[in-house]
Structure formats: C-alpha cells, structure tokens
Image: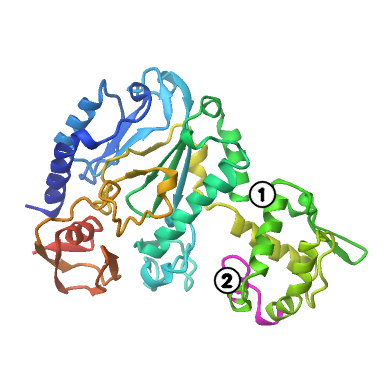
Amino acid sequence: MSDISYLKRLFRTYYKEKRSEIPTVSLFYHREFGYIPWDKKIMMKRHMSFKSQDSITKHLGNEGPRHVYSSGALYTQPEIQDMDGKGYQGCDFIVDIDVDHFYTPCKEDHDFWYCKECGKSGLGMVHKCPKCGKSKIKTSAWICEKCLDTAKREIIKLIYDFLVSDFGISISQMRIAFSGHRGYHLKIENEQIRNLHSNERREIADYISGENISLEILGLQEKSGTIYSFSGDTYGWAKKIIRKTYEILKKPNSEIQELLSEKEKFDFNKNYIKSFLNSKQDFIDKIADNKYFILPSIEGFGMTNWRKFFTGIVHEVGVEIDTPVTIDIHRLIRYPGSLHGKTGFKVQEIFPDELDDFNPLDEVNEKLDPIVFESKVQTTQKLEVLEAQVPATKIKGKTYGPYTKGEIIEVPHHIAIFLLCKEVVKTI
C-alpha cells in the first residue's frame, strides 16, 4: 500500500468514527462545499451542496479527502457551477491569520528554502533568492509552539483590539478555529456585515492590518523645524499608536534595543537606538503628561526617522491578516472538525475564552486536542527521511529530530502521520 493510500484510509476511518462529533456550520443548506482529494492531478472538487449533516459526513467517510472546505458565502443554489447562477445572498466576514504569510523569528530555525534557479538554499523566509534575485523558490514550511503562539496572539489582538473595541462586534457572532496547520480562522456571522461588498471589506482589512495608514493625516507633521505628533485625546489608530509607543518605552532598554533593531519592522542602527534610549524618559514624560504634541529632540531623528519609527509601531499594532481571503466573497474556508492534509491535525473550533490556554501541539483538554491520531497504545512506525533537512518537531512535550536525508527513524504513530502528511518521509 502506498503512503497516499495509507493516509487516505486513515482519513476515511476518522470521518466514519467521528461522524457524530463533526459540527454543523450555520445555514448549512445555503453553503457551497468543496474538497481536495489525495490525487494530486485534481486540484479541487467544489460547487457541492448537501441536504443534511449526515449526508456530508457519509460522503467524507467514503472519500477521505485531504482537505475539506465550506463557503463563507450563502447561496440559494450553492451547487450551481456558474458563480452568477448560484444566487448569492451575502457572505460572512472571514479573517485568516497564517504564519505562512508573515515573518516570525522562529522561521530562521525551521523554515527551509531552495532556489530552483541557482541552487542556493537557506533558513528563514525569503521572497526571492538573495544570490541570483530570482523568485523560483521552493519552501518547506514547518510549525513550532513559537509561531503558533504568534498566530494566536494575532487572533486575540484582532478580537479585542479591533473587532470588539472599534467595530462593536459581539463575541457571540464570532466563530474561531485553529486551521490544523499554521494559523487560525475567524468568521463573523452578522446580517449587516454579510451585505458588504469586496471593496468595503478591503477597507476594514486595511484598517485592521494598518495598511495604507497615513501618519500625516493622524497628526505627524513638521513645522519650522519642530516635529509634532498625534494628539493624546484622539481615538482609533492615533490612540493605538500612542498606547503601543508608551508600552514599548516602559520596557527594559535591552528589549527596546532588540525591537528597534528588528529588520522586519524598525531596522535602526546602533547609534540611532542609543540616541533613542538616551531620550526615553523625556518621551515617557511627554506621553504621561499628555504633552504628546511635540516629539522629544533626539539626536539624528528628523522626520524620516520618526516616520520610520511610527511605521514600525503601526506594524506592531496592526494584525497580520491574509487580506485576499477577507475581500474574496466566494472564498472557501476549512470545514470545522475536518482534517488538514499537511499535518493530519483536526480543524478545531475554539471559543474566545479558550484561546489563552489553547496549545495545539500539546493541548491538555481532550475535547480541544487537534492531534487525533495519537494512539492509546504505544505503537511506533519505521520511516525513511526523504528531505535533505527535516527540522526538530516538539509535539506532546517530546522533541523529534532534526533528521537528514536517508536516515531511518522510528517514531510514534501520530508523529509518523504528521511527517507523512508533510511528505518528508516514506514508510519502510
């Protein structure tokens, strides 16, 4: 039996055994469904509808697909292939937070890339080869507690710093799920928001992420050599920037230095950072006294560096979302309770008050645990490593790897499924 057939059989068994535990999405009859099979020749089968929850779980048990999706949109006839003929009735507001789409420091430890053009390889996140400048990059994305915790902090920030506080969205209208891989999905089920068009959704996405924020409109300006900042009495983004700046200034100097030197956000050199730290207390006093109209005089800080600093603050405040997902009213998202074909983990629904303690790689609450293939009996499988480098993986409190190509390993069942889904090993 091939590894693909083996995984398909396991997925089919899961869907048959867990039929009663797979949740039903709201307005089920108006949703479009789709799935990606294990056969790589078929990209996706979509434009499907089901008459009952029982019918979809039976279908999943028969097919055992690699990935399963349902639409955020509502249709009168979701099974029609022509999008114009489906009878569009509106779409839930969907936000996808996935560390595939933004930088995290831990990627320097576990994300590999390889240039197909010149053969150069390395660790981290690159969009083009640093040697030849080409964009023909093959990547091997991994997961760890650090990057998943980063994604979790982003979804918490989205909920409480934006959706609830700025938009007045009720927690009861939010549906949150761990994606089963490197992030989280949030869906807002609200009749008024369902009627928003793509351009209106883009405006909300830009606000949430801080994209296209004008610092000048918010108040940053220079007059006669004096640089003025944002009013301390304001609301929205200006207030968020002030609050985050004050929060950073109250940190120890070592943490501020590390933050301001980050290439992805601030990228200040040592001299600028030293000047900044020398004026830190003056800056704190101005904010605390609501005298935040004139920025402190810092050696080397003209308008260019202040704009650079506050742009970095905007990146700190904004939420790292995948904007194309939010603005696409015909987007399919992962079905809750389904399996993710790149890990074998379950797409796990979570209530907002469960997020803080949720740890998908070592979850103590059995009802929330997305690792469904952990065997009750201590069974292991022998595998041969196919990739040149496979990063260390810490799951359920134990670390496996790193491994190198050709290495023969023996790991527990759930780790074997994870590595097989990642396509970095084969059974022997």
* SS label for mark 1: loop
Numbered badge on residue 282: none
Image spot of residue 82 (x, y percent): 39, 23
Q: Which residue is mark 1?
A: 212
Give amino acid for label 2: Glu
Which one is in front, 310 or 238?
238
Does the magenta-highlighted stretch encompass residue 261? yes
Place of residue 274 in the rendered image (x, y in percent of width and height, measured from the top left): 70, 81
Residue 167 in view: yes
Left/right of residue 236 with respect to residue 412 in the rendered view: right
Crowd around label 2: few <14 · some 14–19 · many ≥20 (10 Å)? some
Quarter of the image that includes the C terminus: bottom left
Residue 93 vertical position relative to residue 364 in the rendered view, above or below: above
Q: What secondary structure characterizes most of the magenta part?
A: loop
* Mark 1 neighbour density, 10 Å: few (under 14) some (14–19) many (20 or more): few
Give the color scheme: rainbow, by chain, secondary structure or one colour. rainbow
Which residue corresponds to the image point at 32% horizontal and 22% vertical from the top-left? Answer: 79
Quarter-wise, where is residue 292 in the image?
Answer: bottom right
Residue behind mark 2: 262
- Left of 81 or right of it: where is 396? left
Q: Quadrant of residue 146?
A: bottom left
Q: Is residue 213 above or below residue 309?
A: above
Residue 159 is situated, as x and y percent measured from the top left of the image, at 52, 45
Task: Find residue 345 and report its horizontal and vertical position in percent.
Answer: 26, 51
What's the residue type where badge 1 is placed? Asn
Q: Are marks 1 and 2 in contact (CB under 8 Å)?
A: no
Q: Is residue 93 visible?
A: no
Tell me the magenta residue range. Answer: 258-272
Secondary structure, mark 2, is loop
* Mark toward the viewer: 1 or 2: 2
- On screen, residue 72 versus residue 8, left or right, reads right
Describe residue 252's horizontal placement relative to residue 299 as left or right: left
